[in-house]
Image: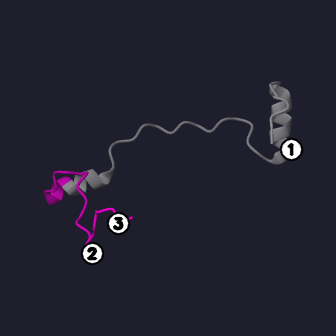
Amino acid sequence: MRIVAFIIEVQVVREILTHLGEPTSPPRMAPARGPPLWEAVMEMQGINDPLAQPEPAYEFDQRIAW
């Protein structure tokens, strides 16, 4: 597959999108949001490191055995 042409005319692009049933305008930008709520829950539970992961329930061998 290779590119043989670019469509750069706005009206032609809108006609193609309309024919395909796609929106012709960009989506609205969402407003900025605060930090995730799980951070507040972790603070309430006394967990200080959000990057800490729980220890797996199984033994994990980190050696390479090729």
User: Residue 12's spot in the image, x, y percent?
Assistant: 86, 30
Question: What amino acid type should be assigned to the residue bearing mark 2?
Answer: Tyr
Give the farthest residue toward the top: 9
Q: Position of residue 27 (x, y in %)?
A: 62, 39
Q: What stretch is highlighted in magenta?
A: 43-66
Are there few (<14), some (14-19), or many (20+) residues within 10 Å of tag 2? few
Q: How many marks?
A: 3
Classify 16 as above or below 36: above
Magenta region includes residue 10: no
Considering only vertical position in the picture, is 7 above or below 47?
above
Query: Residues under labels 1 and 3: Cα distance?
Result: 56 Å
Q: Judge left or right: residue 39 versus residue 21.
A: left
Q: Percent x, y for residue 41?
A: 23, 57
Q: x, y (%) of residue 1?
A: 80, 42
Which element type, helix, strand or loop, lies under badge 1?
helix
66 up-or-down from 36: above or below: below
Circle on res. 58: 2
Instruction: Give me the C-alpha separation between circle 3 and circle 2.
Output: 18 Å
Binning the other alpha carbons within 10 Å of mark 1 as few (below 14), some (14 to 19) or many (20 upward) gives few
Task: Kindly identify the residue that appears in the image at 84 percent across and 30 percent down.
Answer: 5
Residue located farthest toward the front when viewing the structure as drawn? 66
Amino acid identity at mark 3: Ala
Question: Which residue was labeled with disc 3?
Answer: 65
Place residue 29 in its image quadrant. top right
At 80% from the left and 37% from the top, the residue drawn is: 2
Residue occupying the point 35% across, 66% down: 65
The image quadrant of residue 66 is bottom left
Instruction: Residue 19: give its label.
Output: 1
Compared to residue 11, the image places residue 58 above or below, namely below
